[in-house]
Amino acid sequence: MRAAAKRLLYGGLEAAGANRLFSRLNGGSVPVLFYHGVIPSPRRDIFNCEDNHLKAEDFEAQLRWLKERRRVIPLRDYAAALRERKPVDPLAAVITFDDGFENNYATAFPLLKQYGLPATIFAVSDFVAEGRALWVDRLAGAYAASRLPEPEKIQAFQKVKRELKALPDAERRKRLEAIVAEHCGGREPALPSFLAPLKKEQLREMISSGLIEIGSHSRSHAILPRLSAVQKREEIMGSKKILEELCGAPVESFAYPNGDYDAECAALAREAGYTSALACGMKLSRAGEDPFTVSRLALGPGDTGPVISATLSGLRQRLVALRS
């Protein structure tokens, strides 16, 4: 939906009282928001073709709205309420980030401090501990270096990414390396600086602020249901150990890469000692939800005012479902 039309639609719905109605209908639900990155200026190329990295202006507008209209609570507090089946503030909301990009520290963290809002950053342990680029970003870099015409590069990248996510892990890795070799001639794909990983000292500084909790987002961002039981254990349990050593602090929460999980993944997250595990799916988290399958939703570029209100009330998701 075009930005102007979206603002007009949701502005009219808010004026008509639709957001208040859906908030009442979804009483007891909590919006658990997830982001990936925040960058100083907008970027629309193959490396951000899905708007995963919001411009700082949009992110700040969303934080301002949350500060004025919601009570943002730490994930650990919300997870405790789910485990103990206790009610939470009807205006509660939670902020999370996936992957562990350095721009979380450079751009998002100062804004979170400015507004005094807590957040959880789910870091991919091999990314932040060893600098291994995320496989989806390596794929984007390969197609950025390809000889395809510019308009076709993004289409090819998105198509192949969907295909790779559906493959068994060994086959996904093999095909990825073949694509990188084909387009990069034996070199690693060149990636822009905004895709760099967080550093140890940045992680520890954010933790020491009292606003930021670090969670795990697996070791390699593999699609967990495509893995063997042994591989799942290493991704879920091994990442916790690595991150706790890196951060010098407990790692209590886990986020399933791509939001994909199965019963075995949830059981391993419990066994590992996490207190919660999060998915996605553009859903509000419900009272009584299993703390190891917590739903999340996202806000995008230009989502301010009535659009945020419609998303956090559940109205926007209902409209999207009706259109599809």
Image (cartoon, rainbow, N blue to C red):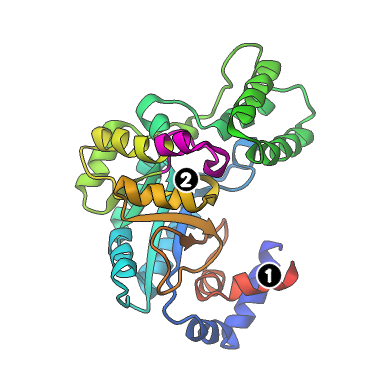
Residue located 31% across and 55% down the image: 275
* Label 1 packing within 10 angstroms: few (<14), some (14-19), many (20+): few
Q: Is residue 187 left or right of residue 62?
A: right
Q: Residue 137, labelled with which disc?
A: none
Q: Position of residue 312 (x, y in %)?
A: 50, 71
Q: Foreground residue, 229 or 61?
A: 229
Point out the tag, 1 or 2, that comes first from the N-terminus: 2
Q: Amino acid at mark 1?
A: Ala
- Residue at (49% x, 34% y) in the render: 195
Label 2 is placed on what type of residue? Answer: Gly
Which image quadrant: the C terminus?
Answer: bottom right
Can I make out residue 321 in this image? yes
The stretch drawn in magenta includes residue 43: no
Q: Which residue is mark 1?
A: 321
Badge 2: few (under 14), some or many (20 or more) residues near its Cα, within 10 Å? many
Q: Quadrant of residue 286?
A: bottom left
Above or below: residue 60 compared with residue 256: below
- In the picture, the quarter occupied by the N terminus is bottom right
- The residue carrying mark 2 is 37
Asked whether 251 or 264 is in front, the reply is: 264
Q: Which residues are magenta?
A: 217-234
Rendering coords of residue 30 (x, y %): 42, 71
Residue 222 drawn in magenta: yes
Q: Nearer the viewer, residue 239 or 138?
A: 239
Q: Is residue 273 left or right of residue 268?
A: left
Identify the residue shown where x is 40% and y is 68%: 66
Judge by depth and name the residue closer to the eye, 120 or 82: 82
